[in-house]
Image: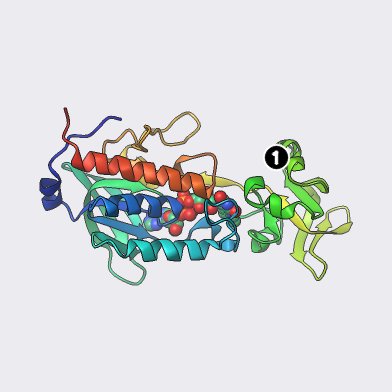
Amino acid sequence: MNIPELHSPDLAAAHFDFDSIVIGGGAAGLAASMVLARARRRVLLIDAGAQNNLRTTHAGGVFLHDGEAPASLYARALEQLAVYPTFKRRQALVTSAGAVDGGFRLVSEPEGLPPEVLTAKTIVLAQGVQFSPSKIPGADALWGTSVVNCPFCDGYESRDLHVLVAGTSDYLTHMAAMLPAWIDDLSYAEGTEIAGMKRGTEGLEVRFTDGRSETFGRAFVQQEWTQRTALADALGCARLDDGLLQLDGFGQTTVAGVFAAGDQSANAMQVNLAVGSGHAAGTGAVFALVIEPD
Ligand SMILES: Cc1cc2nc3c(=O)[nH]c(=O)nc-3n(C[C@H](O)[C@H](O)[C@H](O)COP(=O)(O)OP(=O)(O)OC[C@H]3O[C@@H](n4cnc5c(N)ncnc54)[C@H](O)[C@@H]3O)c2cc1C
């Protein structure tokens, strides 16, 4: 990695409110915060509190916590972080970010309170992604329960159900290659063929535009999403051709001292991956804070 110009930890600490500010308190940001707090760096976690998976009660495949509710995972992580004296947390939205000499300046807006300007020597971006509302009427309200989108997360639990797969033809082709590994009873429909869906007494009731209705156990529905780019762009972080942030092996962006982790910087969205990349970014930030350059 390209280690930024470094100072002794004590000198760095004197000039900034925090050694590191982690933006986003999902799996990635919590993991990064843990590494920084355990390295006795003054870390502030700023989180708007809208982790994408809060709409499900089942986090499938999470290492040592298979099936646990995301809300309980986050509560437990915060409980463990609270033990570390250099860890702080604010519930707020970071609305702008920029460079200052040797570090960064952020504006944090807690709901109902005046904005705060905060400085840090390093930043970890862990903002997750922004999902767009589904065009299928009724699908959004059921997303995370009767409507899901990830075979790795919900495929196993759907194995014995009558399952509808809905989306564009590219999505259907992709899912037709994937889902039979998990599920035997699959039906496919383009999203435009569906007039609406709702939960009924027997299961998921789906109305088609040709007037048919059918009840399914669950639907895999294509979800559109975009990266949250504003802060990374304001900081000058470069992107790859596919739009993802360009990172080194320790999650450092092309801007020295700015790290990224989790869904915000990955195509594969899974809790374990977010934890792993958050841990790597936290490690990279610690290196940047404590190691003198050659
Ligand atoms: C419905 C659903 C079910 C899923 N099920 C599974 C599963 O079963 N197993 C599995 O492994 N994976 C599952 N996933 C995927 C997994 O949850 C994600 O890959 C992972 O949790 C992403 O973590 P993250 O920290 O990158 O982002 P998130 O958890 O989305 O957290 C990002 C946080 O950053 C905050 N934030 C964003 N911008 C700002 C800002 N400017 N200022 C302050 N805070 C900000 C957000 O409010 C949010 O709290 C599921 C996802 C969804 C949506």
The foreground one among 42 and 187 is: 42
Q: Which picture quadrant has residue 169? A: top right
In this orientation, which residue lies closer to the viewer: 279 or 231?
279
Q: Is residue 92 above or below residue 40?
A: below
Provide residue 55's location: percent of width, then percent of height: 58, 62
Quarter of the rendering occupied by the N terminus:
top left
| x and y, in percent, of residue 153 in the image | 62, 50
Q: Position of residue 216 (x, y in %)?
A: 81, 58
In the image, taking residue 194 as reference, residue 278 lies left or right, namely left
Give me the residue at 41% from left, 33% from top: 239
Residue drawn at (60%, 60%) of the image: 58
Horizontal placement of 26 versus 188: left or right?
Answer: left
Q: Which residue is mark 1?
A: 171
How packed is label 1: few (under 14 Cα within 10 Å), some, or many (20 or more)? Answer: some
Residue at 54% of width from left, 45% of height from top?
269
Residue 139 is at least partly visible in this image: yes
Indicate yes or no: mark 1 CB to ligand 1 under 8 Å: no
Tell me: 273 left or right of 174: left
On screen, residue 205 versus residue 232, left or right, reads right
Describe the element under mark 1 as helix, strand or loop: helix
Furthest toward the front, the residue is 64
Amino acid at the residue labelled 1: Tyr
Residue at point 33% right, 47% down?
124
Vertical arrangement, residue 52 with respect to residue 284, above or below: below
Q: Is residue 263 shown to the viewer in this render?
A: no
Colour pattern: rainbow
